[in-house]
Amino acid sequence: MQSKKSRVLVIGLGNPILGDDGVGWRVAEGVKKQLPPDLLVDVDCLSLGGISLMERLIGYGCVILIDAFALEEPIGSILILKLSDLPHYSAFHTASAHDISLQTAIDLGKSMGAELPDDVTVVGIATKHVCDFSKSLSPPVAEAVPQAVKFVLDLLGEKKKA
């Protein structure tokens, strides 16, 4: 049996009742449906961040996060970045355990001895509507879901080869 540390975790982030903020969940659900049976990958959908999200990553060697990004890019654009390439957004707010970036939470967890991944990839879908109460995605974001699913499956294929 493969150890959890060598396994991959895919997490769709967001809130499925806040319009485009639910895109991470939709992509994760699509990945789960199309996941080849030979890939040992855990897929989850969560509405949390910071320390709570960090705790979910404990024991995994590689994590792929999928989330809506409020960007100046065209709505529906897909960006694939390493977590380390993203800014620490909580650095712009007062310091609080409830307002901590995932990068800071991972550093904190590692300093306390938690087995956390060094390999965290973020698949972001550009949107501007993350606060509208709706279970529906806007058309450009909905159209991006199949391509984002393909990107995540491709990333998983690359992780398997490595």
Image (spheres, grey):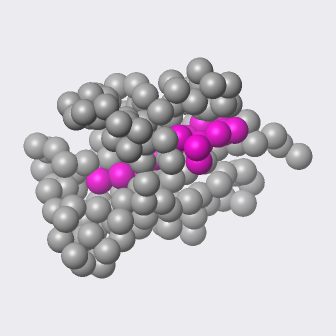
Image position of 32 (left or right of 89): right
In this rendering, the answer to whether 113 lies above or below 24 is above
Farthest residue to the top: give it: 111
- Residue in the picture at 47% in, 33% down: 105
Residue 162 horizontal/vertical position (percent): 66, 29
Along the line of sight, the residue nearer the viewer: 12 or 145: 12
Q: Taking the image as drawn, is residue 46 in sight?
A: yes
Q: Is residue 117 left or right of residue 104?
A: right
Please provide the residue range marked out in magenta. 54-68
- Where 66 sits versus 23, above or below? above
Q: Position of residue 63 (x, y in %)?
A: 55, 41
Q: Is residue 51 left or right of residue 81?
A: right
Q: Measured along the vertical axis of the image, is residue 117 above or below residue 56?
A: above
Label total for image = 0
Which quadrant of the figure has residue 145? bottom left
Q: Which residue lies most toward the right here?
A: 1
Visible in this render: residue 80? no
User: Where in the figure is residue 35, as x and y percent of width and height?
Assistant: 61, 60
Please tell me in which quadrant of the rendered image residue 71 appears.
top left
| Image-based side of 17 in relation to 118, left or right | left
The residue at the point 25 percent across, 48 percent down is: 69
Q: Tell me which residue sits at (88%, 46%) in the image.
A: 1
Q: Which picture quadrant has residue 19?
A: bottom left
| Magenta span includes 7 | no
* Residue located at (42% from left, 60% from top): 47
Front residue (pair 113, 59): 113
- Where 90 falls versus 1 (above or below)? above
From this viewpoint, which residue is outermost toward the bottom?
Answer: 135
